[in-house]
């Protein structure tokens, strides 16, 4: 119950999230903030798709490191992937473009849609060997395959 108040870990954090950026202080608040970011992204989509607004901005979003069942970096949930899936499921969109311009490679979002021909994921980022998520080993394995 203490974890729900944001005061302590329940000891199972490692099952769902990498330890690379384990929060300190009030760790439960990180999960709460992640839920709020996903919720505001959903609300932004509904406002635009419902015709109330032409554009919407989702502040604090872009948690592109989170994978479908495992968080990475400071990203517990992937609001980018959620939003694309929500657009497909609720509003029937068949083609979606995700343009990721963050300095870090959006490895989680990439994994979500790697085999989905309806989602074009363009990721402009700094060399991942020099910044999180440090995909140096992954890059080497791809290079050796070519």
Image (tube, helix red, strand yellow):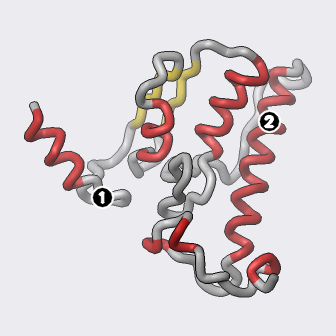
Q: Is residue 47 above or below residue 141?
A: above
Residue on which disc 1 sits? 134
Image position, residue 121 (x, y; %): 46, 28
Residue under the image location 74 percent in, 41 percent down: 41
Image position, residue 105 (x, y; %): 39, 47
Give the class, few, some or many, for how many residues have Cα within 10 Å of label 1's Cα (few <14, many ≥20).
some
Q: Nearer the viewer, residue 11 or 5?
A: 11
Residue under the image location 53 percent in, 68 percent down: 15
Where's the N terminus, which quadrant?
bottom right
Image position, residue 124 (x, y; %): 39, 37
Residue on which disc 2 sits? 44
Mark 2 and mark 1 lie on one chain; the one further toward the N terminus is 2
Label pair 2/1, CB-CB below 8 angstroms: no
Residue under the image location 50 percent in, 37 percent down: 112
Q: Is residue 92 left or right of residue 116?
A: right
Q: Quadrant of residue 58?
A: top right
Q: Nearer the viewer, residue 5 or 45?
A: 5
Q: Is residue 100 left or right of residue 83?
A: left
Label 2 to label 1: alpha-carbon separation: 32 Å
Q: Is residue 138 above or below residue 54?
A: below
Q: Is residue 21 left or right of residue 7?
A: left
Where's the C terminus, which quadrant?
top left
Image position, residue 12 (x, y; %): 59, 76
Task: Report helix, strand or loop for mark 2.
Answer: helix
Q: Is residue 33 above or below residue 104?
A: below
User: Hey, which residue is sitting farthest right in the picture?
Assistant: 52
Task: Report helix, strand or loop for mark 1.
Answer: loop
Residue under the image location 70 percent in, 58 percent down: 34
């Amino acid at each position: 119950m203490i974890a729900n108040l944001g005061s302590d870990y329940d000891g199972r954090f490692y099952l769902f999230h990498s330890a690379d950026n384990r929060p300190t202080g009030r760790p439960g608040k990180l999960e709460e903030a992640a839920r709020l970011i996903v919720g505001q992204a959903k609300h932004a989509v509904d406002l635009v798709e419902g015709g109330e607004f032409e554009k919407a901005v989702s502040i604090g979003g872009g948690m592109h490191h989170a994978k479908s069942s495992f968080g990475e970096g400071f990203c517990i949930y992937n609001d980018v992937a959620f939003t694309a899936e929500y657009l497909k499921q609720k509003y029937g969109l068949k083609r979606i473009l995700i343009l990721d311009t963050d300095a870090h490679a959006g490895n989680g979002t990439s994994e979500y849609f790697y085999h989905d021909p309806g989602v074009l994921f363009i990721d402009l980022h700094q060399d991942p060997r020099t910044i999180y998520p440090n995909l140096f080993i992954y890059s080497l394995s791809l290079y050796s395959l070519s």
